[in-house]
């Protein structure tokens, strides 16, 4: 069996990638990722059937998070790195199996491979399409992709020193469940919602980790121009990597800029003390192929959203760390204390030209839950007076498709008495538009990274409390969300678990939703795909 992948929004023809991923991954990488996931499912079954306590599995817990993260879209294109990870996880799996009395284990818990060729052959029989029933397959994949997103957020929190054993225990339970042929569609639907519940817990953990270490995000103007110093561009999501880089660049004459999902780092008080932390360069992840060219300096990828570089010159300037990887790019590992040596990046920066300016001015963000709660009286007054008629949650991911211009046009055409609540890189479709304010409240309130969608949920729950409503869906809030990869999937499942209904999802519904599973989501939760700007505007505004 050849490659088959449909985990992201860009699945070829809205069905799945079968020759090469639209993301850029090869058939070989796709198959190795499938086998890595299969191995993790085997580990999970051993944990479940062996009645093991996640509290006692530190090394395995952490490796499972890293392995799951490696399979997220645009995270790791390095087949050799994934092969090494498979071997590592098989070794850990076998050590674990030897310690327990578990019978009737699934093939995933016992299979052996002794070469890359054997891995690829095995992968051909255990990929997505190995589950024949379309609805069971759809739900298994929906759960698996939700778990990938949950693992990513848990991984970020772990890097800051925060973890929750309940999350590990659930990851094992959910992954093991995808091997269980006795589970019905109803069982898997229930587990899907349970995945959303633990998604909320993961995002809460990460929020606590970020704010306890870096302070609560605050309203901040972020420079989008450049200075005339050599510089490093930091992409991805991991704030601890950024912090270490900023520490190591002090006094070197090298500036640091954020890119894409790292923009919200500027909102945290702890990062404002670094005088070489200049601003944000460029836009969403998919524009990196042209923006990296003009940046001139090295780029550090801390997590996913890496696009295969167009030229050898750009590839040579890309460094990866954590779960990310690309063939030929230098990968920086942490030592046993989590410290990383970024001196190769700093030395390269010193030898290269400063960034070329591609825009100038400032953008405003930092509207996470603590900051919005501080403005609550002002916001409530604006709602009560009619100055704010509706909130539009337009969080999520950006992507390459031309159809995503919808979100820019939608933002432009929203009535002046509406406010956009956003998080994730979807904001780059409208965060540089001059949409004005309402009584001093900006009409675009950026909470931060995709995981900060948690803040948007807390804001909604707070407004429900203030207005003494029985149901979150009674609020004047519309959800018009863009999605791309698996971290957006866990955000969606988290919102469903919290009871949010009538979410519009675009630019397309996920290819991994079978007709029947899509029908369940539509009938039970009011999930809908986006229409035209005009159609949706009329629908949302009740015209």
Image (tube, grey):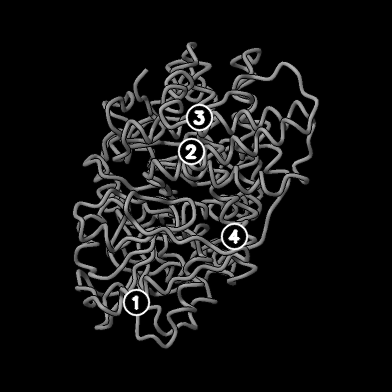
Q: Quadrant of residue 22?
A: top left
> Disc 1 versus disc 2: distance between alpha carbons?
39 Å
Q: Position of residue 301 (x, y in %)?
A: 39, 59
Q: Position of residue 13 (x, y in %)?
A: 26, 26
Q: Position of residue 415 (x, y in %)?
A: 32, 52
- Asked if disc 2 and disc 4 are in contact, CB closer than 8 Å, the reply is no
Instruction: Sort mark 1 into few (<14), some (14-19) or many (20+) by Cα contacts within 10 Å.
Output: some
Instruction: Sort mark 2 into few (<14), some (14-19) or many (20+) by Cα contacts within 10 Å.
Output: many
At x 35% / y 63%, what residue is drawn?
Answer: 259
The circle on residue 191 is none
For mark 3, give the secondary structure. loop
Sequence-first disc among 4 and 1 = 4
> Disc 4 versus disc 3: distance between alpha carbons?
32 Å
Residue situated in front as seen by the camera: 505 or 158: 158
Instruction: Sort mark 3 into few (<14), some (14-19) or many (20+) by Cα contacts within 10 Å.
Output: few
For mark 4, give the secondary structure. helix
């Amino acid at each position: 069996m050849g490659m088959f992948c449909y985990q992201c929004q860009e699945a070829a023809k809205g069905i799945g990638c079968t020759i090469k991923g639209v993301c850029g991954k090869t058939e070989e990488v796709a198959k190795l990722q499938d086998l890595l996931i299969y191995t993790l499912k085997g580990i999970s079954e051993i944990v479940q059937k062996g009645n093991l306590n996640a509290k006692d599995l530190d090394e395995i817990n952490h490796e499972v998070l890293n392995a799951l993260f490696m399979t997220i879209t645009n995270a790791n294109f390095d087949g050799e790195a994934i092969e090494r990870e498979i071997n590592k996880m098989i070794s850990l799996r076998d050590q674990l199996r030897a310690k327990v009395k578990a019978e009737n284990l699934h093939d995933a818990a016992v299979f052996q491979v002794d070469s890359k060729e054997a891995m690829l052959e095995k992968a051909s029989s255990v990929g997505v399409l190995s589950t024949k029933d379309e609805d069971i397959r759809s739900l298994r994949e929906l759960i698996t992709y939700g778990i990938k997103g949950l693992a990513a957020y848990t991984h970020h929190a772990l890097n800051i020193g925060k973890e929750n054993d309940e999350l590990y225990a659930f990851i094992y339970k959910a992954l093991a469940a995808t091997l269980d042929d006795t589970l019905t569609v109803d069982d898997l639907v229930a587990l899907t919602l349970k995945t959303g519940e633990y998604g909320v817990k993961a995002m809460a953990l990460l929020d606590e980790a970020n704010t306890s270490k870096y302070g609560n995000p605050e309203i901040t103007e972020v420079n989008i121009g450049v200075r005339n110093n050599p510089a490093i561009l930091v992409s991805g999501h991991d704030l601890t990597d950024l912090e270490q880089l900023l520490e190591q660049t002090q006094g070197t004459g090298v500036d640091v800029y954020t890119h894409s999902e790292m923009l919200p780092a500027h909102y945290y008080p702890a990062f404002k003390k670094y005088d070489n932390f200049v601003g944000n360069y460029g836009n969403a992840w998919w524009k990196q192929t042209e923006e990296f060219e003009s940046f001139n300096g090295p780029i550090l990828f801390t997590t996913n959203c890496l696009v295969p570089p167009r030229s050898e010159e750009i590839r040579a300037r890309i460094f990866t760390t954590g779960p990310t990887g690309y063939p030929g790019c230098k990968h920086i590992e942490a030592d046993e204390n989590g410290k990383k040596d970024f001196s190769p990046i700093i030395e390269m920066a010193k030898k290269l030209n400063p960034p070329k300016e591609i825009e100038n001015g400032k953008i405003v963000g930092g509207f996470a839950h603590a900051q919005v709660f501080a403005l609550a009286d002002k916001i409530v007054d604006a709602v009560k007076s009619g100055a704010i008629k509706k909130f539009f949650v337009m969080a999520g991911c950006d992507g390459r498709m031309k159809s995503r211009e919808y979100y820019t046009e939608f933002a432009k055409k929203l009535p002046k008495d509406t406010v956009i609540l956003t998080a994730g890189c979807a904001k780059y479709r409208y965060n540089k538009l001059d949409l004005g304010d309402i009584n001093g409240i900006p009409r675009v309130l950026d909470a931060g990274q995709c995981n900060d969608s948690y803040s948007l949920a807390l804001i909604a729950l707070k407004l429900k409390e203030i207005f003494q409503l029985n149901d979150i869906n009674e609020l004047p809030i519309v959800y018009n969300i863009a999605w791309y990869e698996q971290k957006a999937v866990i955000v969606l499942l988290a919102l469903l678990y919290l009871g949010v209904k009538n979410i519009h999802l675009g630019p397309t519904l996920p290819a991994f939703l079978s007709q029947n599973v899509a029908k369940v989501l539509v009938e039970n939760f009011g999930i809908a795909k986006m229409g035209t700007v005009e159609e949706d505007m009329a629908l949302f505004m009740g015209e």
